[in-house]
Each structure stands twice: as C-alpha cells, then as structure tokens.
Image (tube, rainbow, N blue to C red):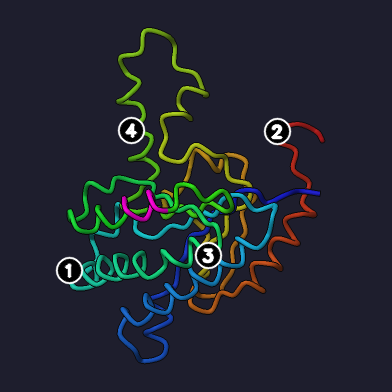
C-alpha cells in the first residue's frame, strides 16, 4: 500500500469561488486561508504524512491587479502571525520555499520568525511556496552549481533546490489540469489528482478520499512492478 509521505497541493479557485457568490475576489482568499489551516491540521494528525507543500504565491502572481497582490501580502503576514500558536500546538514545522527576497522586509521578517520558532517541531512540515516558480527554482540551483569542477549529478541538483523532497501525491483543486510551474522536478513520479472542487470548498474529508485512492494506485517508477 502506498504511503503519501509528501503531499503537494495547487490551491486553485479562490477568486472564482468569491465571484460565484457575488463577492470580491479577496473574500475567496480569506476563505482559502481558513482551508489551509484545516488541511494542515488534518495532515498533522496523520502519522504517515511527513510533508505538506502548498502553492501559495507564484512568480507569475505578480501579474495580478496591484490591489489584489497587496491584499495577498497582508493576508500572508497576518496568517503566519496568527497561525504560529497553531503550528506549535500541532508540532508542525513551517518553512517557505521560493525567492522570498521579492517580499517586503516586514513580510520576510515574519516568515523567518515563524521558521525559527517552529524549527524544533518534528511532526509534519508545512511548506508554503512563496514567490515560487519551479523553472526559477531550477535556474537558481543551476547557477549555484555552474562552477562545479565535477559533472553535475541528480543528487547534487536535488540538494540545491528549494524543496529537496520528491512528491508522492500532487493535487490540484479548481478544475484545471496543469502543473502551473509547481514542483516540476520533485513531481517527476508523483501521482496526479485533479478535482473540480474550488479550494475554499475543499475539506479534510475530500483529501481523505483522494489519499485512499492514492494508496491503491500501482506505482512502477518506470519499471514493470
């Protein structure tokens, strides 16, 4: 039986959820933040789940309207500060992947503070992909390795990436069927699950259903069995 040690989720559909209810898009992001908490808490209660990586803000998201981007930055800062006690209570270690240098000094400080204060937690690791794009991640890794005096190996490359752990199960909510520049290297042999459910409507029960389906998939990794 497969174990979903590392689950990655593309949290899509916040804006569409809000628009469908006649609300501003930012209301969808607020609701989506509540789901992040619920899903993280659920995963922290399942011993076999070691890592949960969530696509929170991509390198392409800067193209969105300025006011929406500003709201997302404030929401992220507020979320992390409010969730710190929850992380500690559930023994969850927080880490950010991506180029956080693109954020304000205040937000960078909040991110680093939460990382430091949860560094001792040895339960679930929750990674938020922030100002993250897989192509950018790979390019930054290659630039760090380009002066190596030896041939670059898969192991060397993996160690230089922001996320150093292969994905077992990758889920995208919202109905689209694409990876959108998310964990391309790490998802080389991930099992992909797509759902039409918009992220604000996604629940731990839905995640549980997907995990059960995942456990029954035959994973061959290029071999016959």
Of circles 2 and 1, the one toward us is: 1
Quarter of the image that includes the C terminus: top right
Residue appearing at x 37%, y 40% in the figure: 135
x, y percent for residue 169:
62, 52
* Residue 139, disc: 4
Query: Mark 3 or mark 1, which has the lower sequence index?
Result: 1
Above/below status of 151 relative to 68: above
Measure the C-alpha gap from mark 3 to mark 1.
35 Å
Question: With 225 as the anchor, is 176 left or right in this view?
Answer: left
Dot 1 crowding, Cα within 10 Å, few <14, some 14–19, many 20+:
few
Residue appearing at x 17%, y 53% in the figure: 105
Query: Mark 2 or mark 3, which has the lower sequence index?
Result: 3
Q: Are marks 2 and 3 in contact (CB under 8 Å)?
A: no
Residue appearing at x 41%, y 39% in the figure: 162
* Residue 89, disc: 3
x, y percent for residue 184:
48, 42
Dot 2 crowding, Cα within 10 Å, few <14, some 14–19, many 20+:
few
Query: Mark 4 or mark 2, which has the lower sequence index?
Result: 4
* Residue 222, disc: 2
Q: Are marks 4 and 2 in contact (CB under 8 Å)?
A: no
Which residue matches tag 1?
A: 66
Q: Main secondary structure of the magenta part?
A: helix
Above/below status of 105 relative to 204: above
Q: Secondary structure at mark 3?
A: helix
Range of the magenta residues? 112-117
x, y percent for residue 107:
24, 58
Q: Does the image show residue 134?
A: yes
């Amino acid at each position: 039986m497969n174990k979903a040690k590392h689950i990655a989720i593309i949290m899509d559909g916040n804006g569409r959820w809000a628009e469908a209810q006649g609300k501003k898009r930012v209301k969808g992001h607020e609701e989506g933040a509540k789901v992040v908490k619920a899903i993280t808490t659920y995963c922290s209660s399942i011993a076999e789940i070691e890592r949960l990586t969530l696509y929170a803000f991509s390198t392409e998201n800067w193209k969105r309207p300025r006011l929406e981007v500003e709201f997302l930055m404030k929401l992220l800062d507020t979320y992390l500060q409010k969730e710190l006690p929850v992380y500690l209570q559930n023994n969850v270690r927080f880490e950010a992947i991506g180029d956080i240098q693109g954020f304000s000094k205040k937000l960078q400080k909040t991110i680093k503070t939460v990382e430091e204060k949860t560094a001792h937690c040895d339960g679930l690791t929750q990674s938020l992909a922030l100002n993250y794009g897989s192509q950018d991640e790979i390019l930054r890794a290659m630039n760090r390795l380009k002066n190596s005096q030896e041939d670059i190996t898969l192991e060397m490359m993996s160690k230089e990436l922001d996320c150093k752990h292969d994905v077992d199960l990758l889920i995208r909510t919202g109905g689209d069927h694409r990876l959108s520049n998310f964990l391309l290297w790490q998802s080389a042999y991930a099992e992909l699950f797509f759902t039409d459910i918009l992220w604000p409507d996604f629940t731990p029960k839905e995640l549980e259903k997907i995990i059960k389906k995942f456990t029954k998939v035959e994973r061959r990794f290029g071999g016959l069995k």
